[in-house]
Amino acid sequence: MSVVAIVDFLPIAAERVGGALGQTDQQNLLPARELQAMSFIVHIPLVCFGIALPAMFMFVEGLYLRTGNPVYKALAKRWSKVALVLFAVGVVTGTILSFEFGLLWPNFTATFGSVFGLAFALEGISFFVEAIFIAIYVYGWDSLSRGAHFLVGIPVVISGVTGSMTVIAVNGWMNDPGGFDVVGGKVVNPRPFQALFGGNVWHELVHMYLAGYLVVGFLIAGFYGRRWISGRRDLHTRTALVVGLSFAALAAPVQVIVGDWSARTVADNQPVKLASFEGLQQTTKGAPFHLGGYYSKADGGGVKAGVPIPRLLSLLAFHNPNATVKGIDTVPAADRPPVNVVRTSFLTMVSIGTALMALGLFFVAVWWRKGRLPESRWFYRALVAAGPLALLALICGWVTTEVGRQPWVVYGFFRTQQAVTDAGGLWIAFTVMFVVYAALTAATVWLLRRLPSTPARSEAPEAA
Amino acid sequence: MSLALVSLVLVMAGLAAYAVLAGADFGAGLWDLTAGGATRGGRIRGMVQRSMSPVWEANHVWLIFVLVVLWTAFPTVFGSVFSTLYVPLFLAIGGIIFRGTAFALRGHATTIGEARVLGATFALASLLVPFCLGAALGGIASGRVPVGNATGDLWSSWLNPTSLTVGVLGVVTGAHLAAVFMAADSVRAGLPDLQRAFRTRALLSGVIAGAVAIGALPVLASDAPDLFAGLDHGGGLACVVVSGLAGAATLGLVAAGRFGAARATAAGAVSAVVAGWAVAQSPYLLAGELTLDQAAAPHATLIAMLVSLGIGAIVLVPSLALLYRLVLNGTLDQEYEPLDQRFKP
């Protein structure tokens, strides 16, 4: 589907596809969306660990192989155990997501499964490979040879990449659909490979990937930074701190560049979503960008109480301060996303991303010039906050793109309200799942926060 | 063999793998639950923890595999089944969350109290999941899922004689498989007391599973006559006979202490039930509503999926083989430790 075609039909051709399971009565839309959002908020941080932690423990194991220093082995082993627990939790929360394709959105899957399903078949393979090799890696520390053990880790890293790639490919497709035709309201002639590798996949993948390194890198750096500043300056703590911090500090500036790439792609593919980032009501040449404030529909619509920076939106979206940016009112009211949710999430993400970049660059500058870790207490205080903030930015990023996609589940073709289940009682399900997720999160955090500091018997002799 | 049939065979093979491998993991939960107090049950629970740890995640992925192949190849079936049967399936995912998380976290518990709470959660959830999934399958098998968005009955679609029978069968066959597998693991670990304990459990649960399976036949005859009609002749009957013989052989092998061979026959008995279901329901995926050919996604989708899975299998099959080889030859075995002993100072 070309960019031009989507933009052109949007205002005129809503409801292009009818659901394979017929019309829905739509009453479940809100609880279904909230339950789906909650499920993602629990699962996505675990995905970050799946993406980033294997590369980190492999890096530390590499240090062990080069130096033979058992401290590195103990650290890599520790992290791999944490990774296994988080992988286990990710396995179950990921299973919930796959069930929700049917439990919440049966008409979406029934209508478009033949188009996008392939990605999940590929994801299933990746998931299998990851599960197999992470188990061999963690349970094979003492029984496999050093070289064999390192090799076993490589598929874990690779399958983490391919697994998230295929899932993100589906999200990219939902935002920029292609690879099928519509005849008489029915989806026909699916071309699954074409569907999965459309224009949105690559920037979303890289953006998510770096976000994984930022979140995990800063969470680890914050955890060990607190130990470092409290005086536990041993090699174990120092290595953990430097590895986490380095991954995050290197990812942060690149993330800003990738974010720019993402924004420009959105400007091309989903102009209404881009307009919602700012709250731009009318199509404007040299459009400004407001910091703070809120979007209001009063007086024809626009941002109130914000600080305008002239021409910034045009510059961000098209790298041209005089470019014309399409406004929200280029589509009927029924086709617009909830602007304030999108806008607030976007601003939060960008603000945090910028701050994290500054923090990362400060570390790199100190390391470069003085060859040591920063000494300032403020740096470590910032570091403790950086992990949770990175997590918040990640979630805001997903809210930006997913709420910005509304009211469509398949952008321009199929509305979210057409996709939802007709089964009742979803608020009950939401409430139950809320309690379940709260218990899951509390138990996981409770047990894991001790794991890096309690001496495990199997590691103690080496780590001492 | 049509592409649709190949896709269905993949779904059923995945389901059989899940029923055998993950079924045994759920069954381990039953033995964990019934092992007794912290001290008396410590030895059984130590073996449960040790046997399941390296494999349960990979075993669980078979469920994901079944779902994704189903929604790619038979999207209407997936949407209809999940919207009508959402109550047992919601219960199942609740159980899946608690089972997996509690099991993974129990490995890192630092007090017996924590281990007890996590263990009870793991064990109870291990009963809930196979029952609910079995009940959902029973709803499909007995023709209670119409095509449409939640158009089947909310309750009777899974609270009916067939569903209850299949649910119970899911729980007891899992328990039987678990006992057989862990008896073999106990031999490898050189723990004769556990070998005896699991042998007894395997025999007991095997007799119960057999009784439930035989008892299921008259239930099906009255509650799901169309399905039953597919089981009393031809391929369906052959599957029933194979399952019965494999089950009987398992009991004999367990009694003789030949647990390695019993693993294979027990797996065969369960797989034959899954195959028999598919054969008996043929040509329908949703009884009386949707045949295999009507339900199948367009040709291009099936080709893309089968080619991708074929390429994936080049990686996956040797990987799985490596995992199970390392498990069965003891490379991934951790030192055996009764669960309660971990918390002794």
Image: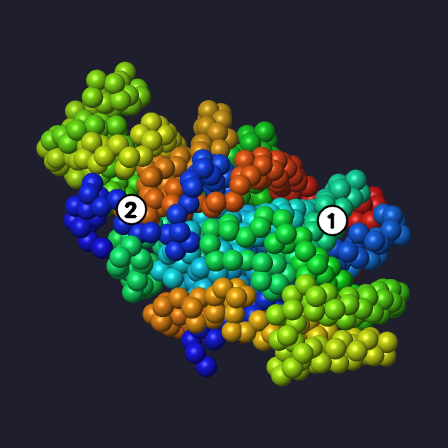
Q: Mark 2 and mark 1 in contact (Cβ < 8 Å)?
A: no
Residue displayed at 18% across by 26% down: A288
Quadrant where the N terminus of chain A is found in the figure? bottom left
Q: Position of residue A325 (x, y in %)?
A: 16, 35
- Mark in the foreground, 1 or 2: 2
Helix, strand or loop at disc 1?
A: helix
Q: Chain of mark 2?
A: A
Foreground pick, A17 / B28:
A17
Tell me the CA gap for discs 1 and 2: 45 Å
What label sits on residue B217 in the rendered view?
A: none
| Residue A347 located left or right of residue B333 | left
Disc 1: host chain: B
SS at circle 2 = loop
Q: How is the image coloured?
A: rainbow
Q: Which residue corresponds to mark 1?
A: B124
Residue B306 occupies quadrant: bottom left
Q: Which residue is mark 2?
A: A15
Residue B326 visible within the image: no
Tell me which residue sits at (78%, 60%) in the image.
Answer: B47
For the residues tagged 1 and 2, is the chain the same? no
Please tell me how crowded label 1 is: few (under 14), some (14-19), or many (20+) other residues with Cα within 10 Å: some
**Residue at horizontal 23 percent and vertical 23 percent from the top:** A302
- Residue A357 percent location from the top left of the image: 35, 35
> Disc 1 marks which amino acid?
Leu
Q: Nearer the viewer, residue A328 or A49?
A: A328
Q: Amino acid at mark 2?
A: Glu
Residue found at x 82% / y 49%: B340
